[in-house]
Image: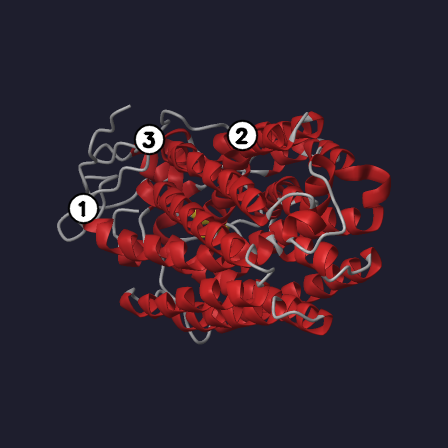
Amino acid sequence: MSVEPRSGPDPESDPDPGSASGQRSHPDQVPFPGRIPGPEVLPTSVPGPAGLHLHHWNDRAVIGLAVAAMAAGFGQFGAVAALGDVARGFGRVTHGLTLADQAGLSGTELGIGLAIMRLASLGGLPITGLADRYGRRKMLLVTVTAGLLLTVVSAISPSYWWFVVIFAAGRPLLSATNVLTQVTAAEQTDSADRAKAVALMAAGYGVGAGVIAIIHSLASRTLGFRGLFVLALIPLALLPVLRRWIEESDRFAVAAVASKHPMPVFGAVARPYRRRLFLVVVLAFAVSVTTGPANSFIFLFAQNFLHQRGIVTAAMIVGAGVAGLVGLLVGRWLADRLGRRLTASIAMVAVALFAVLAYSGSSAALLSGYILGVFAGAAFSPAAGALVNELFPTSIRASVAGWALAAGVIGAVAGLVLFGAVADVDNHFALAGVITFLPASLFMVLFWMLPETLGREPEDLWPDL
């Protein structure tokens, strides 16, 4: 389907496309196509720039978004947590020395399967872009519901490749859910609360992923991987709560009535924003080259090669959960004091170094590398999430997030295929880590080609909202 090019705003000459007088009207004064009626603004909402009604990071509307992020993490991370069981269930384990003998499926098969699931998240680009037309709240509720339902359906897969296809069908929906929670949280808060709100979204996703990983570690023999995916019915039961708590953002409401800003459908981004978009896309690609294989192979490596007991893996996950919480707090604090760019770049280089350590070959290295890597990754999230959402106006913010998601998918696929192929040769996980993670960390220098947004509202950087 073709996409009409966006007629981009002129940030220099049009201070406020929503009003000829230069004064922004409150979104409730003008009905607009695609707006979804939501709950009344809570009394705790606070006046924002240009008369917007914003929320504190711990208001109910923002917490509802964190619950949606938690549901997405619970649904998505099951395939990673249960990768060893999936390989054994659909493959054949022998007493040989190769990866295929010990895991049940070869590293290439596992890498390609994970790559397909990751590649499916490219569908998150058009889905996320639709939120710039139909609203954040509506698309969030649709994506989280459909994504969790497909996760449940994957439990009845008759073969490994059927499992890959069904699980992959739900992945773009849950990926879009995760992205849209961050976009909406960023829009509903001001500069003082934005990094906190983005950190809360990352914490929600992390809690969901951690819960499913702990359940698998402690009850994999009882549930099996099929029972694990059926558990996605539990977050589905939270949908009535999400419908009551999640609200449409005022920033989107204003952007939606701006006559000069037709909403993009498939991620169309006008010329004034493309240089920043290019830098964000390259950074998202490089970040995912590291995080894709670093997260996806970790439990397979622990269970099938180091033969780590389930209780130890569960303890490792709990330790990583604590480290992740501390990392979010530290990352939020640094992002609000040292700046988004410095915090994000240093944290991501640390992620790459700790990932190399985790795959270096010993149980102690795995535990320390994984826990410290989760800490660094958590510190990265508030700074990077706040930066990307502050760099672009509301009218294209979800579309930009969709492009970053797509670039991250391609980066993760590249990382998975490269890591899996190297690890397949005599089980050289340590070498695979060095070859995959360290070169990607060099791209973090690109953060310094973006403007620092600490203490600034998106309206300061782009006057058109």
Q: Earlier in the sequence, mark 2 or mark 1?
A: 2
Amino acid at circle 1:
Arg
Amino acid at circle 3:
Val
Horizontal and vertical percent for residue 247? 53, 37
Which of these two is toward me, 136 or 287?
287
Q: Is residue 316 left or right of residue 175?
A: right
Q: CA distance from mark 1 to mark 3?
A: 16 Å
Horizontal and vertical percent for residue 447? 34, 66
Q: Secondary structure at mark 3?
A: loop
Q: Secondary structure at mark 1?
A: helix
Q: Earlier in the sequence, mark 1 or mark 3?
A: 3
Quadrant hosting residue 327: bottom right
What residue does disc 2 label?
A: 169
Amino acid at circle 2:
Ala
Which of these two is toward me, 366 or 389?
366
Q: CA distance from mark 2 to mark 1?
A: 32 Å
Horizontal and vertical percent for residue 390? 37, 56
What residue does disc 1 label?
A: 271
Horizontal and vertical percent for residue 169? 53, 30
What residue does disc 3 label?
A: 265
Which residue sits furthest bottom? Answer: 338
